[in-house]
Amino acid sequence: MLNPSKRRYRLRIVIPAYPAFNIYSGIARTTTALGAVCVASAANKMGKWDVEVIDENNLGKFGPQSDTVGADHEFLQRQRPADVVGLYGGLTSTIPRLYQIANFYKKQGIITISGGQHFVEETIPEALTAGIDYIVLGEGEETIKELLQAIEGNQDISEIKGIAYLKNGDPVFTAKRKSLTDFDNLPLPDFSLVRYAKIRLYPVERIRGCGMNCEFCTVKGSPRHAEPERLLEHISLLVETYNAKDFFIVDDLFGQQRDETIRLCRMLVDYQRRIGRRLIITVQMRLDKARDNELLCAMRDAGIRTICIGYESPIEEELKAMNKHIRSADMLSLTRTFRKSGFFVHGMFIFCYPLKDNSGFKMSVNERAKCYKDFILKAKIDTVQILLPVPIPGTELRGRLQRQKRIYPLEDIGWEYYDGSFPLFEPDEPLNSEEIQQSSRRVMGRFYKFGYMFLVPVNILSFTRMIFFFHNIRLGWRRWYRSWRNHLIRFGGWIILRKWTIAFRSDKFPEKLQKARQHLSHMQ
């Protein structure tokens, strides 16, 4: 327990490093995890606690780097000893690193807490024996305050809702805590608590939850929203405090509250006019919102430039298996509407999703790859990411594949591979894991090429073509800028894919995959 003679205590929340280079590594060095900042901001309002966040993926120029991966926690403890350490478990692929950090602090007698989407009934027993004292279930802003008070000795642990811990060697689950609905009672996320990080892209939110019920996703339940004024207040605070310009609204589906979303956009327009500058905003959105012209106009005026869309697949049978409520035939026309409205479209795909039944549908991996290539080409999507299916703990997909005994054993293919880059289960016939992984990278390789490097200077030289659009300078600028931007990003994507391939080869994953397949065959 805590030293009662101390006047103040320190809570350190750590966002664990990615296990290896992947497609998220670059963006991770410019942003941070909003969930960790929200919990830290709530705890920082307590009278006796000083709180800091250490993002191992974004340690900036002056952050204490370890010799292997992540931060140097020995240095941190010497410089600013923590009394309690919280560990962000929002990404399954970072869990092995999370356990490593937890064990480091546990050996020093430090109390450890964790929480995040990874922790469900299946994974909690493992976590409680891997150096974690308490696991927060669900949203953590209220729970963390009560838990810290209990650790101080002011409250009985068993009375706190929404936690799990070990008692006499067995996991104990306290009563479930209701989801938050009154966001006005929470402090605005305070990014000053994130030490060392150099943040360029600021994550913000207004709505939590998603009612789409996709099979592969852990975000469920009716959307719960804050008022638009709260989000505007947060954005204006970041602009005025950090000169922030780029924002990512992390709501799973922007526009779920149509009228309030339009009101938010109009408020953003007025705010930008008042301060005399334009903001750059990225959102996640459903394709069918392209049919709402009033919403699109409001978004464009508000400074929303990029829309991230979960296409998942252009194959009808795969969309049905995912519980996606859209037909592939509608995707092309809706995408064109977004592009004509002036938005950049980032397409997110899941390659070779496992079907739910033996309906007789058979498609080779090469045929599937061609479907993806043709669709991306016809839709003229600006940027893409193509990942493999990930059976994340707590999802219907994982439950289905576990019942079918198709998931590779964790002792062979551990949590660190759960980032969408690796095959994690036996695929549908006639597919095999090696072909799926290679084909997904080939599709990405057709999109992100070295040759785009030569088109970037060509775009710069062609800037004078805008003179032919003297009747509509704005249209000429949009066309030129889209071409220049996309060629630059696609060359950058080639660099990322190259580093990704090098990291994959050094890991010797094919040998692990062969061993996992052998173990799986013995289990069946």
Image: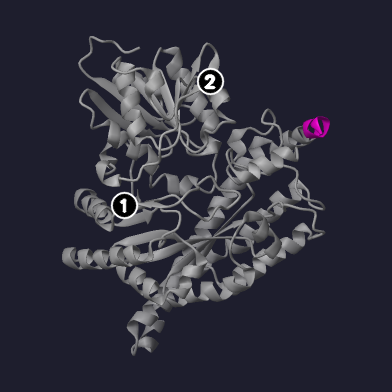
Residue drawn at (38%, 81%) of the image:
475
- Above or below, 380 against 216 in this view is below
Residue, disc 2: 171
Give the amino acid at mark 2.
Pro
- Residue at the farthest left position: 274
Type of amino acid at the residue the image marks with label 1: Ala
Q: Is residue 63 visible?
A: no
Count up the numbered dots: 2
Is 519 drawn above or below residue 436 in the view shown?
A: above
As displayed, is residue 246 above or below residue 10?
A: below
The image shows residue 172 at horizontal and vertical percentages of 50, 21
Q: In whole angstroms, how far apart are the C-alphas of marks 2 and 1?
A: 34 Å
Q: Are there few (<14), some (14-19), or many (20+) residues within 10 Å of tag 2?
A: some
Horizontal and vertical percent position of residue 185: 25, 42
Quadrant of the image occupied by residue 318: bottom right
Relative side of 517 to 382, left or right? right
For numbered disc 1, what is the local secondary structure?
loop
Residue beneath the point at 52% across and 36% down: 118
Q: In what element is the residue under mark 2? A: strand
**Residue 163 located within the stretch drawn in magenta:** no
- In the image, the segment drawn in magenta is 518-524
